Amino acid sequence: MKRENVLVSEDALARQREFEAKIKEMFTAREAHPVACVDTFGCQQNVADGQKLMGMLADCGFTFTEDPKEADLVILNTCAVREHAEQRVFGNLGILTHTKKENPEQVICLCGCMAQEERVANRVKASYRHVDLVFGPHALLAGTADAEIKAKYADVIDQLPAMKELYGHRARLRKERGCMDIESGEVKLILDEDGHCIDVKKRTSGESEAMIEEFMLLANQCAAHFARVKQIPFVYRVHEEPNAEKLERLHGLLQACGVNDHFAKDVPTPKELSAILEGVRGTPYEQIINTGMLRCMSKALYEEKPKGHYGLVLKDYAHFTSPIRRYPDLAIHRIMTDMLKGTEKETMILRYTDFAERASKQSSEREVIAMQIERKAEDCYKAEYARRHLGECYEGTISGVTQRGLFIELDNGVEGFVPASSLTPSGTSLTEGVRLTDPASGKTWSLGDKMMITIVRADVNLGKIDFEVAPAAKA
């Protein structure tokens, strides 16, 4: 798309510079290792009205237009190129939300942007680990942080309580909607300098990362709301309710685990499923039911029509916050920036209807392929890690039961297979997909049971790991 500068009024520039001054009070939260960093936020507390959340996103579509009067949400259009601790800003899609005390769910979308090149430096770049120290019970907010942490956050520390309070409001509303909190079981692969996997750990996230994720969900929601209200072509993130076949499989799993799954209608609401997840939290079935529920969900897709998001319980949703790594985000940045330039609605429809349809279809297809590749690569890395520990014994949890045998997941997320033939010489019978039984001895192996195993084989090329029941367990 051709990039062009559009002249704006001095009044618009003045309002923009006022907004820029606020941006300079922002800081970036990120993981400690190098990542594409777009999670840049700042927050101001207004005793009378509530909190104002500001956000900046690096990249990508580009144009200039007049900034409207400040309202509940302003999406600022800029394009950033990072240079050391600064951003050279041409016009980056960012947000300014005003969360009203009387109605923190309210979302109103307006748009604005800046009209000339400027340098905007983030006051602080913070790792999630350090911000979690700020939020921790024995750290900065408690008055027990060391001098180094206090000095690092001196310029922005006044914002953190307001951000935490705002996050609390948003998290409460999320829970009231019935949004499902499904644990994905994501792992972190530790590689040496030669790229070999030397460790695998379950990925954990602290309060600061959850806070930033919630703010990005709000930005995504606001972008989709903007497009739906303006009735322009768009690429929405759509998640429809689960189909009957998948719900039947979930019913079987829940019944086998002794979980009551009586729902008011044929299709359960997200709030009903959330209640089940909460009910099994801390039990041996927690991870199994989390996984089963995740598998019963419909695959989220990109579509040009706003159909809502079942899992998040949102009428409006799109992927907006990651244009430097995800094409649908870049596509809607291009659409929105053209709209900000002042393009008429009719022209937008003619220009982008076919584009939004093609972008949605291609993005959905490529996402599936990318996920398959990612899973296969992860399996290969896990097998490489397991190969370093052949002959070693570990405790695991039965995560899957088939007629052929058991899938065992170790505490770090590595999963392997125990053939049924190695469990007992007399053969086994399968019960409802959740239990193997030895008819001769009556011994059973059920989903969620603990088991000691030995790593006996690891095929790195195929990403396959084989376990055997540990000798002590057999005895």
Image: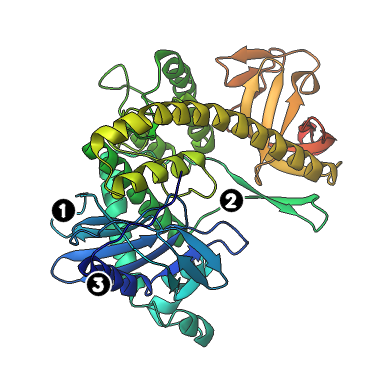
Amino acid type shown at disc 3:
Ala
User: In the picture shown, does residue 409 fall above or below 162?
Assistant: above
For disc 2, the neighbor class at 10 Å (few under 14, some 14 to 19, many from 20) is few
Q: What whole-number distance in Å separates the C-alpha atoms at marks 3 and 2?
A: 45 Å
Could you tell me if residue 281 is visible in this image? no
Considering depth in this image, is 165 or 271 the residue closer to the camera?
A: 165
Residue type of the residue flagged with mark 1: Asn
Give the residue number, with chain letter if any, for mark 1. 103
Q: Quadrant of the C terminus?
A: top right
Which residue occupies the foreground of this view, 149 or 351? 351
Q: Say which element carries label 1.
A: loop
- Vertical position of residue 388 compared to residue 258: above or below: below
Answer with left or right where residue 209 lies relative to residue 412: left
Residue 139 quadrant: bottom left
Q: Which residue is drawn at 19% across and 64% down?
A: 50
Locate residue 364, reporting x and y percent: 50, 29
Q: Distance between the residues labelled 2 and 1?
A: 34 Å
Q: Where does the image place residue 204, in percent across and percent down from the top left?
A: 55, 53
Q: Which of marks 3 and 1 is nearer the N terminus?
A: 3
What kind of residue is marked 2? Arg
**Mark found first going from the N terminus, 3 or 2:** 3
